[in-house]
Structures are given as structure tokens and as C-alpha cells.
Image: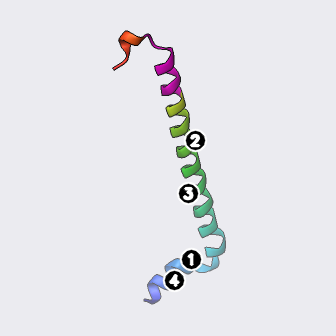
């Protein structure tokens, strides 16, 4: 149990490390969400612009 506590405390640097992990995770999730929305918008635009015989 002491090893686990020591790991999460990270020799006193936990106050810097864990928020950094949280910020990076939030940024990556945000980029993923923006990319998905952009892809959906592009697919919708392509579907609108394509001729009717090419639509499935």
C-alpha cells in the first residue's frame, strides 16, 4: 500500500504531474471531438453535392 501511495505522490511532484495529465487528456479528447464533428460536416456536404445516382 505504501508503494501505491508513493507512486501517486510522485516524490512531491504530484501537484504538477497529475494536472498536466488531466490537461493533455482534455486537449486530446477535445481534438477528437472537433475532428469527428468536422468529418461529419464534410461527409454531409459531400452527400449534398454528389449527384443523386452516386448516393447509396
Residue for point 52% across, 45% down: 32
Q: Earlier in the sequence, mark 1 or mark 3?
A: 1
**What percent of the width, then of the height, locates residue 56?**
33, 20
Which residue position is annotated with label 2?
34
The mark closer to the camera, 2 or 3, is 2
The mark closer to the camera, 2 or 1, is 2
Q: CA distance from mark 1 to mark 3?
A: 19 Å
Q: Nearer the viewer, residue 36 or 47?
A: 47
Q: CA distance from mark 2 to mark 4?
A: 37 Å
Q: Secondary structure at mark 3?
A: helix
Q: Which stretch did the figure color magenta?
A: 42-51
Q: Secondary structure at mark 1?
A: helix
Which residue position is annotated with label 1?
10
User: Are the residues flagged by discs 1 and 3 in contact, CB closer than 8 Å?
Assistant: no
Q: CA distance from mark 2 to mark 1?
A: 33 Å
Which residue position is annotated with label 4?
6
Counting every numbered tag in the picture gives 4
Badge 4 density bin: few <14, some 14–19, many ≥20, Cα 10 Å: few
Considering every residue shown, the one lying at the far bottom of the view is 2
**What percent of the width, then of the height, locates residue 51?**
44, 10
Q: Earlier in the sequence, mark 4 or mark 3?
A: 4
The mark closer to the camera, 4 or 3, is 3
Which residue position is annotated with label 3?
25
Q: Is residue 37 left or right of residue 13?
A: left
Above or below residue 25? Residue 44 is above
The mark closer to the camera, 2 or 4, is 2
Residue for point 54% across, 30% down: 41
Amino acid at each position: 500500500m505504501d508503494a501505491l501511495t508513493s507512486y501517486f505522490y510522485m516524490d512531491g511532484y504530484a501537484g504538477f504531474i497529475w494536472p498536466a495529465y488531466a490537461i493533455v487528456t482534455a486537449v486530446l479528447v477535445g481534438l477528437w471531438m472537433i475532428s469527428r464533428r468536422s468529418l461529419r460536416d464534410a461527409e454531409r456536404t459531400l452527400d449534398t453535392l454528389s449527384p443523386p445516382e452516386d448516393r447509396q
